[in-house]
Image: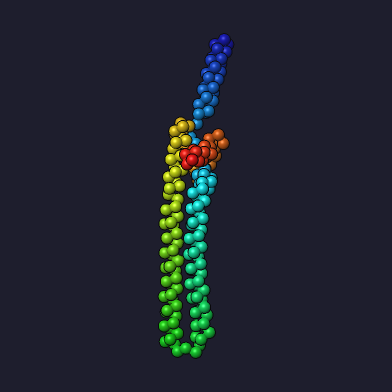
Amino acid sequence: MRLVLKGLFVLCFISLFSISSYAQKEKNYPIGIVDVATIATQLPESVEADKKLKDLQKGVTDSLQKMQDSFQKRVDAYLKQKTMMPADKQQSQEEAFRAEEQQILGFREQKLNDLNVKREEFLEPIRKRIKIAIEEVSKEESLKLVLDKSSSVVLYFEDKMDITFRVLDKIKRGSK
């Protein structure tokens, strides 16, 4: 009986020591969570880049709308006169419309590609700046891994693991 009590006592002591050791390790997480989207939306250069992109996009949208309106007016006029045209002229006009429609679609696709190139051009320095700040905060906090909160990979985290505002603070302090 005494042997069982001693064994139980030793087991409880080891368990308490393990729990205490685990609790101390738990305080120093080697993993951090950051919300890159939150940081990006609060940076002045992001706001400026977003405004520039919206202005470019509006210009493209306006140009496309004018082209489509003009095209539609010509198609409507053709449809009104179609019955009075000879078949060969109808066919040549319809082919011209198909070619013009392809030109409009090509123009649209080219402009969307141009917008994507501009978006990357504007966002790359911002991403680089955020990455550098994340690396600095990670080194300061002795983090071994940092996950982006906005990605679908992060399923759960404790708030104390979130370094978003420390990274944002690092960027803002570094830019002054």
Q: How is the image coloured?
A: rainbow
| Residue 92 locus on image (x, y percent) | 41, 83
- In this rendering, the answer to whether 135 lies above or below 76 is above
| Residue 22 locus on image (x, y percent) | 52, 25
> Furthest residue to the top?
2
Quadrant location of the N terminus in the rendered image: top right
Which residue shows up at 46% across the image and 43% down it? 130
Task: Evaluate whether residue 148 shows in this view.
Answer: yes
| Residue 75 locus on image (x, y percent) | 50, 79
> Furthest residue to the front?
176
Task: Evaluate whether residue 147 shows in this view.
Answer: no
- In this rendering, the answer to whether 104 lies above or below 49 is below
Which residue shows up at 50% across the image and 71% down it? 66
- In this rendering, the answer to whether 159 lies above or below 20 is below
Residue nearest the observer in this picture, 79 or 117: 117
- In this rendering, the answer to whether 27 lies above or below 4 is below
Which residue shows up at 49% across the image and 89% down it? 84
